[in-house]
Amino acid sequence: MRAIARTHGVSYHTVKDALGSAWPQKRKEYADRGSKLDPFKPFIDEMIRTDLNAPRKQRHTATRMYQRLIDEHGLTAVSYPVVQRYVKQRRSEIAAEMGRGPATVFIPQTHRPGEEAEVDFGDITGRLRGELIILTCFVSECRSAARPCTERR
C-alpha cells in the first residue's frame, strides 16, 4: 500500500480507504462561517437605498462606499473587491425591491408572419471534382404589396 501511495502521490490512508470501498466517503460538511463584510452590509444597503432618490452625479460609487466604511466604521479586514462585488449585486436587487428595476418590454409585430418575406434554409449534397460535399442553401422570397418580387436567389 505504501508503494501505491508513493506512485500516485496520495497518502497511505487514502489507499487504505480505496481498498476498503470503491466509493469514496462523503466529505465532511462545514458550517457556513459568514463573511467579514456581514456587519457592514446594512450600512451599504442603506447607502444604496438613499442613492435611488439622489441625483445621478451625487450617488455613491463602490469606491466611495469603501472609503466611508473605512472612515466612519473602521473597516480594515475587508478588501475593496469584496465590497465592490457586494455593491454590484445588491444595487440591482434593491432597485428591483423598490420597484425601480429594468422594465420588461414587449413589442408586438405589426405585420402578419410571412407577409413580407419568406426565408428557407437547407442542405444539399453534391459532388465537386469527384468529392462528396454538403452545401448549405439559403433561399429567400420577398412579397411586397408595392412591388411583387418573384426572383429566387
Image (tube, rainbow, N blue to C red):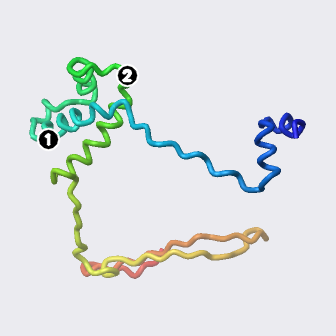
Residue 37 in the image: state x and y as whole percent.
33, 31
Q: How many numbered tags mark residues here?
A: 2
Residue drawn 26% across the image and 48% down it: 93
Question: Label 1 crowding class (10 Å Cα cut-off): few <14, some 14-19, many 20+?
Answer: some
Q: Mark 1 highlights which residue?
A: 52
Label 2: element kind: loop
Look at mark 2 in the image and give the residue it sits on.
77
Residue 151 placement (x, y as % from top left) = 43, 78
Q: Residue furthest right?
A: 3
Asked whether the viewer can see residue 148, the reply is: no
Q: Nearer the viewer, residue 87 or 148?
A: 87
* Residue at image location 79% in from the left, 71% down from the top: 130
Q: Which amino acid type is shown beneath numbered disc 1?
A: Leu
Identity of the residue drawn at 69% across and 75% down: 126
User: Which circle's residue, 1 or 2, is located before the other in the chain?
Assistant: 1
The picture quadrant where one finds residue 74 is: top left
Image quadrant in which you'd find residue 99: bottom left
Q: Residue at image x 72%, y 69%?
A: 128
Mark 1–mark 2 Cα distance, whole angstroms, equals: 28 Å
